[in-house]
Image (cartoon, rainbow, N blue to C red):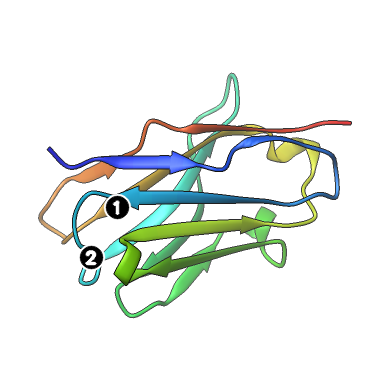
Amino acid sequence: QVQLVESGGGLVQPGGSLRLSCTISRSIKNMLILGWYRQAPGTQRELVATITSDTSTNYADFVKGRFTISKDNAQNSVYLQMNNMKPEDTAVYYCYFRAALITPAYWGQGTQVTVSS
């Protein structure tokens, strides 16, 4: 059973920063895509950022210039550096991956991020 363990969530003031980490219990080196989604209360889960096996990245418009996704194959981990955070970034953040086109997506349990003064 593959596991994704997220950490780094918490409470931060507007304008502050947080770094989310997601460690996966298998090699991520050749995984097709890894990424982060988020879900605020009463809303649907939405894409935040993705990174592919060749380290190409993609960001939702609402985080461009503020968030950075990265990965460390040696640590089997994917990260989300969040800067200049806003109250509307408040949500549960989920890590996920898809190893290949024909394989299912796997999700972490989520980590709460709250941006408030």
Q: What is the residue that sits farthest to the top in this orientation?
A: 42
Q: Residue furthest right?
A: 117
In the image, 69: left or right of 82? left
What residue type is disc 1 on? Phe
Position of the C terminus by quadrant: top right
Q: Position of residue 75 (x, y in %)?
A: 34, 63
Find residue 97 and name its label.
1
Indicate the position of residue 92 as horizontal and vertical percent values. 54, 31
Q: Which residue is mark 2?
A: 31
- Residue at 43% across / 41% down in the picture? 6
Q: Which quadrant of the view contains residue 60?
A: bottom right
Crowding at dot 1, Cα within 10 Å, few <14 / some 14-19 / many 20+, comes out as many
Q: Which label sits on residue 13?
A: none
Residue 26 in the figure: left or right of residue 14: left
Name the residue: 45% across, 33% down: 110
The quadrant in which residue 53 appears is: bottom left
Is residue 113 left or right of 1 when viewed as pictured?
right
Indicate the position of residue 7 as horizontal and vertical percent values: 49, 41
Q: Are marks 1 and 2 in contact (CB under 8 Å)?
A: yes
